[in-house]
Amino acid sequence: MEFTTGGRLEVRITASDVGKRVSVRSLTGSGGRHATFTDTVGVLTSWKEGVLHITRRGGQSVPIDEAALVAGKVVPAAPARRRGLPVASVRELAEVAARGWPAAETGRLGGWTLRASTSEPSGSVAHPDGAAAARRDGFTARANSVLPLDDPGMPLEEAVTAAQRWYEARNLVPRVQVTTGGERTDELLAAELERRGWSGERYALLRIAALAPLADREPDPRVRLSRTPDEEWLSLYPRSGQLPEAAWRVLTGGPSVWFATVPGDPGREGPSAIGRCVTDGRWAGFAAVEVAPDRRREGLGTAVMAELARQALAEGASAAYLQVESDNAAARALYDRLGFADHHAYHYRRAPQESSHAG
């Protein structure tokens, strides 16, 4: 990482660079021989009262004391993409992913899409003493959060209040899905929500790959494809059980949805592996790839994805995406081997627990 000009370290960023991607070097430690240099790359989201906040690619905000700065500069908005990967904007992938996991109910707030998927009826729910009732999470955060693709068309304070009321009327935890680490992502919005007390949670990555290589193997007759998940498929799904209607609509919704099952061996209860794929134009979105604990490391996850990829190719898709939790090292290693690479990160900002606008 090069910071020098004429052999000197220089700080070439100011508070006017808020919103830009920067690279800084700071001195950490108590000074002297115990001090160390730390390099931080991300979006500069604030510079106030002698403290900088930089949001890293993964969505974590890092505070840095201005007095500790040794060097800094503005860097390109996004790193170069690996050759052979599909070319796509963050917005395109956010929209495709939302269509591939569609909420049971949606609302609009300017350029924000409000998503809810719960069996709870609309209408405020409150305790007799007037305090807000315990909020529910709904069926997955993706289907129960704000997707802020554009400006909400009103001051942020009003938009946040309106969104909170919409979710609280459905007895849901208000959440906003924010993207980071790409071009035109939501670092500034995430920082503003953090300033208002909205905590970060469920950090994840959206990864992409070329589709054809996934299917470049002999067909596997063990994998069975169907349009809807049966009881066998659901028995291995992590959120199995009595799915409410809204959850069923999310799971089976999307432009062209397929479910893969590798049946269990004779005398064994439950399937050996499952997966889900939705085809939407050039994109094939993979989700719910699960392998029974006693059948792992046999290539069943790869087989499931290959057969789903073969079906998506037949429907005209050419690119693949999936979403994986940032700390799921085993899944990330599998997807690395299949040619997937990070496109951008995202996480959720959750409203403060004591906040309530219901009434």
Image: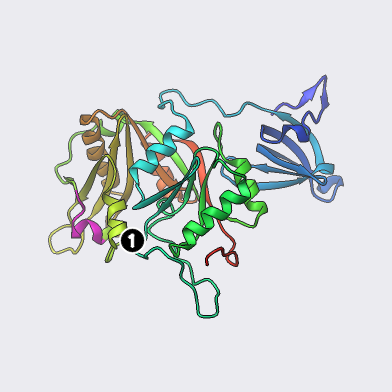
Total numbered labels placed on residues in the image: 1
Looking at this view, is 301 or 59 the one in front? 59
Residue 289 higher or lower than 312, as above or below: below
Disc 1 element = loop
- The reply to whether residue 56 is in sight is no
Expressed as whole percent of the image width and height from the top left, the position of residue 259 reads: 23, 47
Expressed as whole percent of the image width and height from the top left, the position of residue 81 reads: 50, 26
Residue at x-position 26% and y-position 47%: 300
Residue 271 higher or lower than 278, as above or below: below
Looking at this view, is 163 or 194 the one in front? 163
Q: Residue furthest top?
A: 6
Q: Residues within 10 Å of mark 1 (few under 14, many from 20)?
A: few
Q: Residue furthest right?
A: 32
Expressed as whole percent of the image width and height from the top left, the position of residue 342 reads: 47, 36
Expressed as whole percent of the image width and height from the top left, the position of residue 203 reads: 51, 50
Work out which quarter of the rendered image holds the N terminus and state it: top right
* Helix, strand or loop for the magenta stretch, by majority: helix
Residue 123 higher or lower than 71, as above or below: below
Residue at x-position 81% and y-position 48%: 34
Looking at this view, is 117 or 206 the one in front? 117
Q: Is residue 105 left or right of residue 113?
A: left
Range of magenta residues: 228-235
Residue at which label 1 appears: 239
Residue 264 picture quarter: bottom left
> Is residue 103 located in the magenta-colored stretch of the structure?
no
- For badge 1, the amino acid type reads Arg
